[in-house]
Each structure stands twice: as structure tokens, then as C-alpha cells.
Image (cartoon, helix red, strand yellow):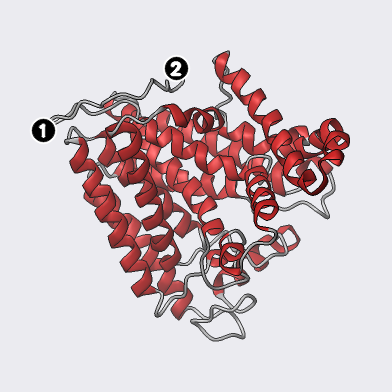
Amino acid sequence: MTPPTVPERGPAPVSATAPAPERVLAIDALRGFDMFWIAGPDLGHWLVTSVLTLSLGSLPPWLSYQLEHPAWQGFSAWDMIMPLFLFIVGAAMPFSVQRRIDAGDGRWSIYGRALRRVAILWLLGMIAQGHLLECNMARLKLYSNTLQAIASGYLIATVVMVELRSVRSWAAVAGALLVVYWLALSFIPPPGLAAGLYTPDENLAIWIDRTVLGSTQDGTHYTWILSSLGFGATVLIGVLAGRVLRTPLAPELRLLILAGAGVACLLAGWAWSAVMPIIKHLWTSSMVLWAGGWSLLLLALFYYLIDIRGFRRWTTVFVVIGANAILAYMSQSLLDIRHLGQFLFGGLCGHFGPGKEAGLALLTYALLWTGLWWLYRQRIFIRI
């Protein structure tokens, strides 16, 4: 596939209507922005926190909160990374899955391709966080990783797009998934417990995971099996956003729809949180809408700056990362990039005094980015 180009800054032509684009640079840049933080994994988080700590001496409480996961209930900026990843996968689907549907590809051809992708994502997820390469069944975790959440959400969204051709139907299914998940958690009691509990060890979703997965459950309070309903809804919100960007509407109207939908999702998520708390560990329906709202607003911002206003030069750093997103994400598991960075630059950074940590983070990230940039220049893209 031809990689996304990053042209010079220039005015973007705007008309009352515009042809449906075959690629939107904002999606590529937003994918890279999200991957910037978790490549390595979490090299971007390490780099930003170490630079801020060096600059400020210590992080103020409000900023520290935004750069960490809340212990249970609540939502921080750092919590956005995983739902944004799923959202972006969905946003790209109208340019891939929908294009194959429009081209007349058969149902089973599309499903076969989707199942192949699901299998590979599942395998990579087990490598990244499931201890698969250790060949130790006692440590093997079956369902415990973002890539597997993407696989579940992607499969659900693919079935919805193939079987239901109406955009309204897609939105209805996304809403139904959230309502069914809410009803299940609210009214189905786990054995020996009451229904409607949202504590770490007393909720239906964690009971299902521990019962079904047994020793292969990851030992955390993150939930996966029943939460797959929410994963599907998150990807479908992205699908709906991508569909907006693929329509032949005027760019300003696409922007208005994205921004309006983002605000609507935030309001709905906030209202729903009164009866179903925003808890990322459980991927609650209120959290899906809250994160979906911010994802839509981020996409709207990137679309405005890049595809409407034409400010594109700055996107290169992110597009390079996003072009090989899976490799960037898996670099720690496959290459042990942090250990390599320590081996190459640890001695040098030891002379940086208080800047040692920031210098090591910067040079390690530069090492990864340079490798991704070389692949990008050679048009080598490791895709699933």
C-alpha cells in the first residue's frame, strides 16, 4: 500500500461539496500520535514525564494525575490511549473494509481476511502481555492485551458493516452493545454477589473472566470477555467517524459533524456515569462514550489543522510512527528497545547529571524512530 504523503503546508481547497477521499491524513497522524505514547511500550510517556520532571522539578498533582491511570474510578488523559487506539482502527475501516464491500468482494472473502487479522492480533497480544514466548503454561495469559481488545472490536465491527449496510444501523448496534453491557452489569448478579456492583472484585465482568479464563486470567482487575461488547462499540464509534470523513460533504460540514458528535458523546457519557461509573478497567458504557467523545474531538482537531487548513509538515514525526504502528507497539517484546537504548546510551547519559533520565529516554526514542523512518523511506510497511 502506498504510504501517506506529507506535503508542504499550503491552503486546502474548500468547496461546497468535496469528493469522498480515499485517504485522510488526519487519521494517519492521529494513529501516530497515539502510538507515540505507547511505542516501546510507553516510550513516549517515559520521554514526556522525564522531560517535564527535569523542567519542573516535580510534577504538580493535576498533571501527575493526567499522566497516570486512576486506581479505579475516574478518567485521565493517559486513559485515552487504549480507547483512542480502538477508535482509530474503526475510523480506518470505511477506507478498507467498506471499500471492499463497495467493490463487490464476497462476504466470506471479507470475513476470511478479518479472521486472519484477528488471529494475528491475538497472537501478538499473547506475545506482548501473555508471556507466550516464555513457553510456560503456568504464566500464559489468554486474553489480556490491547491488541486482543482491538481484535474483538474489529471483528464485531466487520460483521456489522458487512451485514448491515445502513449507517443508522451501525449507530444503533453501537448503542445496543452499550445498553446490553450496562443491563448485564446492572441486573445479572454473579454467584454469591448482588447485581449492579462496580467494585474491583465484585462485578459480573471480572467474575466471567476468572471463571472462563481460570489460570490464564491476567490477575488484574481489567476485564475482557464481557467487555468485548464495549470494545465493539468503541470501534464502531470510530467507524462512524471514518464514514463521515469518507462522505462527499464539504470539509467544514464533516468537521462540524465530528465536533458535534464528540460533544454529544461527552454529555451522554457524563450523564450515564450517574448510574454507571466511568471505569476504564471495566470498559463501562459511560467510559466508552466519554472516551469516544474525546476521540471524536481529537480527530476533528487533527482534521481541521491538517486536511482543512493544510498544516502538514509537523505530522511527519507521527505519520512515520503510525505507518508501522504494530511494529512500534511490539518493539519492546521483539527487540527489547529499552534494554538496547540503555546498552547504547546509558554510559553517555550518565554524564548528563539531572538530565540523565530525559536524555536516555530521548535517545532511546530517537533510536526507535530512526528505524521506523528508514522503513518508511524504503516503503516497508508491516501490516496485518
Earlier in the chain: of badge 1 and badge 2, it is 2
Residue 31 in sight from this viewpoint: yes
Name the image quarter holding residue 218.
bottom right
Residue at image location 37% in from the left, 71% down from the top? 270
Viewer-nearest residue: 170 or 342: 342
Check disc 2 and report its element: helix, strand or loop: loop
Residue 315 in the image, given as x and y percentages of width and height: 46, 31
* Position of the C terminus by quadrant: top right
Q: Which label sits in the foreground, 1 or 2?
A: 1
Residue behind mark 1: 16
Mark 1, residues whose alpha carbon is within 10 Å: few (<14), some, or many (≥20)?
few
Q: Is residue 207 above or below residue 132?
A: below
Q: Is residue 354 above or below residue 186?
A: above
Dot 2 amino acid type:
Thr
Left or right of residue 88: residue 46: right
The dot on residue 237 is none
Viewer-nearest residue: 227 or 112: 227
Residue 377 in the image, given as x and y percentages of width and height: 56, 15
Left or right of residue 24: residue 71: right
Dot 1 amino acid type:
Ala
Residue 159 in the image, given as x and y percentages of width and height: 38, 43
Viewer-nearest residue: 96 or 34: 34
